[in-house]
Amino acid sequence: MRAHPLDDEATGRQSFMLRRLHALSGVAPVGVFLVMHLATNHRAVEGRAAFDGAVGEIQSVPLLPAVEALGVLAPLAFHALYGVVIALEARPNVGRYPSTRNWLFVIQRVTGFVAFGFVLLHLGQFRVAKALGALSPDGFYARLGALLSEPAMFAVYMLGLTASVVHFANGLWQSGTTWGFAASAGAQRRMAGAAWVLGLGLWLAGVDTLVHFFARCGGLFASSSAQRDAVCQGADMTEGLSNQGRPVISSRAAPHIEGPARGGRPSPRGPDHSR
Ligand code: HEM
């Protein structure tokens, strides 16, 4: 039986609204969260105290579990799940018409799937672990040090970060078209330029943070030994983990960075956990 034209119209209106809501949720609150999240994490390159201070400020937000659930996790779930529906409906034609726009269309879908997988893993490692009482906020720095000093996990985080940021920057530009405020070719070019500059800045901040944990201190831009020593003097990335009476996650995850008094170079051995 053929659907009534009014039913078709109602379904069309519904999916038009859902598309707009999807584009909006990618910018705010999900995109806004990503910018704030990468900025907060970047405090790690200033050292453990700065990172813990930034985490402490978030933990003191009133009604934090409700803010996280309604302001971050629910919109992220809607954006990701409806994004999968849109991606599966799409008919990529990049084979026949290999234009930049068609490539960006494919890249948006691929990065969406990669970012989705990464966020699930990342939520398990931090948000679920915290909810289950297996990890407390003062152990985030140590846990990041333990995870990211492993080359394989560092590579996973690089991939997840890159996919998330490319997806966000490309989506920001596309949402201008969806919402109609970048209608002319000139406005679209300006919007694309601004989105990619923001994306590059976010990506560099994220890579700097990841390098900090991988190199067990320092970062992309603070690699001179004097700068590293200033930030990392006495830093022990495993401290939060051992405070919780839990085993250290891996043998590489036992960075021990000594201050200039003892040569100012990272020790080749980890700390002694036998005591
Ligand atoms: C530099 C790389 C990153 C680091 C070091 C990092 C670190 C963290 C930490 C420590 C937490 C726990 C915060 C808490 O539960 O209070 C967290 C949560 C979270 N992260 Fe990341 N993250 C990174 C990149 C990303 C990226 C690229 C995304 C992509 C969207 C992301 C999405 C999330 C989400 C959704 C949460 C849960 C937030 C909440 O419950 O409010 N993270 N991250």
Image (tube, grey):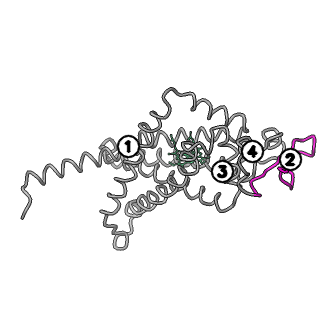
Cβ atoms under marks 1 and 3 closer than 8 Å: no
The amino acid sitting under disc 2 is Arg
The local crowd at label 3, few if under 14, some if 14 to 19, many if 20 or more residues have their Cα within 10 Å, is many
Q: Earlier in the sequence, mark 3 or mark 2?
A: 3
Which type of secondary structure does the marked residue at label 1 adopt? Answer: helix
Q: Which is nearer the eye, 271 or 245?
A: 245
Tell me the CA gap for discs 2 and 4: 11 Å
Q: What residue does disc 3 label?
A: 210
Q: Is residue 56 above or below residue 87?
A: above
Q: Answer whether labels 4 and 1 touch (C-beta < 8 Å).
A: no
- Residue corresponding to mark 1: 25
Above or below — where is 92 with respect to 68? below
State the residue position of label 4.
242
| Real-space Cα separation, disc 3 to disc 4, in angstroms | 22 Å
Query: Secondary structure of the magenta portion, mostly?
Result: loop
Element marked by disc 3: helix
Q: Give the mark nearest the N terminus, 4 or 1.
A: 1
Please tell me whether mark 2 or mark 4 is closer to you in this view.
2
Residues packed near mark 2 inside 10 Å, few (<14), some (14 to 19) or many (20 plus): few
Q: Nearer the viewer, residue 118 or 35?
A: 118
Q: Ligand 1 near label 3 (Cβ, under 8 Å)? A: yes
Q: Residue 52 occupies which quadrant of the picture?
A: top right
Q: Which of marks 1 and 2 precedes in the sequence? A: 1
**Label 3 is placed on what type of residue?**
Leu
What residue appears at the point 44 percent right and 39 percent down from the top-left corner?
69
Q: Is residue 42 left or right of residue 265?
A: left
Q: Earlier in the sequence, mark 1 or mark 3?
A: 1
Q: Which residues are magenta?
A: 251-275
**Residue, disc 2:** 275
Residue 5 spot, x, y in % from top left? 7, 55
Viewer-side residue, 233 vs 125: 125
Residue 156, visible in the rendered structure = yes
